[in-house]
Amino acid sequence: MSKGLPKREDDYSQWYNELVKRADLAENSGVRGCMVIKPYGYSIWEKMQGQLDQMFKDTGHSNAYFPLFIPKSFLSKEASHVEGFAKECAVVTHYRLKNSEDNKGVIVDPEAKLEEELIVRPTSEAVIWSTYRNWIQSYRDLPLKVNQWANVVRWEMRTRLFLRTAEFLWQEGHTAHATREEAEEETVQMMNIYAQFAEDYMAMPVVKGLKTETERFAGALETYCIEALMQDGKALQAGTSHFLGQNFAKAFDVKFASKDGGLDYVWGTSWGVSTRLMGALVMAHSDNNGLVLPPKLAPIQVVIVPIFRSEEELQAIEEKAHEIMDQLNPLGISVKFDHRDTHKPGWKFAEYELKGVPVRIALGPRDLANNTIEVARRDTLTKEMMKLDEVDVSKAIPALLDEIQANIYKKAKDYRADNTRKVNDWDEFKKVLEEKGGFISAHWDGTAETEEKIKDLTKATIRCIPLDQVKEEGACVLTGKPSKGRVLFAKAY
Amino acid sequence: MSKGLPKREDDYSQWYNELVKRADLAENSGVRGCMVIKPYGYSIWEKMQGQLDQMFKDTGHSNAYFPLFIPKSFLSKEASHVEGFAKECAVVTHYRLKNSEDNKGVIVDPEAKLEEELIVRPTSEAVIWSTYRNWIQSYRDLPLKVNQWANVVRWEMRTRLFLRTAEFLWQEGHTAHATREEAEEETVQMMNIYAQFAEDYMAMPVVKGLKTETERFAGALETYCIEALMQDGKALQAGTSHFLGQNFAKAFDVKFASKDGGLDYVWGTSWGVSTRLMGALVMAHSDNNGLVLPPKLAPIQVVIVPIFRSEEELQAIEEKAHEIMDQLNPLGISVKFDHRDTHKPGWKFAEYELKGVPVRIALGPRDLANNTIEVARRDTLTKEMMKLDEVDVSKAIPALLDEIQANIYKKAKDYRADNTRKVNDWDEFKKVLEEKGGFISAHWDGTAETEEKIKDLTKATIRCIPLDQVKEEGACVLTGKPSKGRVLFAKAY
């Protein structure tokens, strides 16, 4: 167990906060609610970005960049949109500071007041749709499939590293289409891409579903989402994809000349994932020794730690280490050889466990003599001796990384299976939620009132109406009114 | 000449503005002074980012992310720094909107006033050095070499796409070192990396030099820069690297325990390039037909345009086109096959010239019969017939791209050589500046007063004291006072 890291089972929340800081992922800044993403944390985010960006490009999207600021009047054009974001936004009102009269500091210059206030974007629909108005005239300009990597600001009062911060990094896709069907297909496609990324790269199983009307994005007709289960039994919304209908096209007057000579509003989608995924990654897999990173997103996949007492021993080990690196690097495996003499091997072992490096190779003089390496797995915390006379490192290590990736995924999936419960009775609902947490699959009468009441009584929300929902006659777990299928409840981040 | 594009020689400024818009690089947004970077423009920026990021990582830098907002008090800690940026900054004063009393719109909620105003970062020294204070305790924590890709805001009153915008994208490196020498080396190294990038990738020759005290970064002891010459004879500062001394360490109290047991302030650097480079790229090479992109930064390096009258002809051409693509794609060359039937070949030719695609291949039925391709170069606007029986496409096209890259660079370098003039006389100085522009290499007495006077009289500024300055006794071109070497004057963007 890593020195000083709180135990996960004692205080999950404290364990998470400390782990994020100690593993050098992120820390709170001196600016209220804003975090600093540290180099190690950022290198994981870069791996996420790289993979997602490739998936977006492979499906025909291009990146672009739109302004950070949104004039107040733009935001107000779509009624439910402004309603959703006005209550927590950063407002720029002035454009200059000046020296104070006593010359002891700087103050806001009252003469430099903006005619119209600017909102720091909480999301970019407003500024993007006001731009699309000029980009789209005819069906030939469609579909328009644009993505943006950017920072956004939502003035959250209670913040938490990665999970809920005033400023966060994300990508937001914004597409425009000639038909409703095409826009709906795009919405579903992007949810599927998010699910594929979560499962194949983050090794995190997700439930694909639809949000209820209450939980929908402000301005959308439908919100698709992926929901994951964390190790404390709470759910986390990991990505959303919105079918906007013609709402923003109407609000910003974006029409196109159709093939048959008509003039119609375009159909829109928007979809996003954020640095929140970093929090999900930590909470889905890590343990009391620190991070457990899936090999596909680990900035360092293999670390080689030399065990040496003299410079001479180190040199011999270094030669062997480079042999191994020369076999692995060409395969695209990132290997770090930590030859620092300022830290002992035991310290390094703990450090790379804390940082979640999937595979650790220890190399000492005895290994050189026997032509062996000691290979330790981060996910299982087990070690094995590999005989290099018998095993081809360039095959064994990639296979081991694949096995670790699969094992982490399986473990998370088993956990989810063990913690997803069908519940048919209100008392049981409350009991399961209180004693065990996890996903509760239960009937709901379909009304916002019942949804709200359940939330008030238990803090559980409907995470989603799963896409694979089975049609099944039932009675609402709270009201007993008729229901046609189960939805997924949980307490959530 | 591209339809409707103003001629470069008639109105350079208008030519630039129109070209940036028509080539789909960027456009003005509905938000004062902020631009939208369009997908094609952004894809060039992504190529720039990718290359620079690799160069930073190869020299041991890691990426991280720091808050968008800087509390007013942080900014004020370094006196000359706040002085330099306070006059043009976006100030966040509130964190909520609310419905107006008449319910007809939203207004800033006066009850949601921040206790301390937040400045949208114009640069991040203040927030980064306040963080470094916690990251640096001992010499073991040094050097700390961090870079950030981010947006920044400077409230410029007169803006121009890419060259001067209220919001722009950039990277900012911030390093901390144990010794003055090491920090100075880092500063010079980063200037050299910028110069290498400008010359090898942007095909844009630059002069490396030091800024005068007047032109230095607010808070730096020395500012190194690279200066390029645009086709209208005006200079453009393309990148800067600052030696901060211990200024920010002192302002933010960043001390480290040295090897010998002492306690000392760390030495700092910062360095940055921005989307301004996009403007430089356009202005350095483009012509009346549109953009001229150096192959190394062109998102599309080769475009294949089919000449066909029937679906049958197109099919035969498509087969040949894919043969060519299969030879070029594995070499990392990006080839686009534009088989759209909505546009004629002539329209496509003009479009790809406007977009600056380095090589265009035309393929028609006669080419298929003769096993030839028509290859057109964007830089020289010349065409040649390539006989595929005699020429290996997988060698000829890469060689041609290299030749184009070299030719664009040479052309820019020749232009600069023709437009750099040694001037020893004040009347000649004014005459050259007015009639010819370009760089003027002249003696200067070393005082800020003379520098200022020359600027007032002619609008020319000292671009830099070149690093390769020759020691030479001379008389200041304005005052006649003694000087020990020439500096570089120009009107500048």
Image (tube, coloured by chain):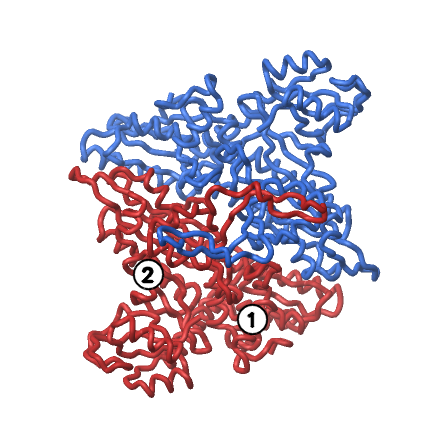
Chain colours: A red, B blue
Query: Looking at the figure, which quarter contains the N terminus of chain B?
Result: top left
**Secondary element type, mark 1:** helix
Q: Nearer the viewer, residue B103 or A253?
A: B103
Q: Amino acid at mark 1?
A: Asn
Q: Report which residue position mark 2 lands on.
A: A192
Q: Is residue B351 visible?
A: yes
Q: Amino acid at mark 2?
A: Asn
Residue under the point 31% across and 49% down: A248
Q: Report which residue position mark 1 lands on.
A: A17
Q: Nearer the viewer, residue A46 or B70?
A: B70
Residue under the point 70% across and 16% down: B423
- The 10 Å Cα crowd at callout 1, few under 14, some 14 to 19, many 20 or more, is some
As drawn, A233 above or below A195: below
The image shows residue B324 at horizontal and vertical percentages of 35, 37
The image shows residue A276 at horizontal and vertical percentages of 47, 63
The image shows residue A127 at horizontal and vertical percentages of 39, 46
Residue B66: quarter of image = bottom right
Is disc 1 on the same chain as disc 2?
yes
The image shows residue A362 at horizontal and vertical percentages of 62, 70
Residue under the point 63% across and 53% down: B127
Could you tell me which chain the residue with mark 1 belongs to? A
Q: Is residue B380 left or right of residue B83?
A: left
- The 10 Å Cα crowd at callout 2, few under 14, some 14 to 19, many 20 or more, is some
Q: Nearer the viewer, residue B191 or A323?
A: B191
Q: Nearer the viewer, residue A253 or A76?
A: A76
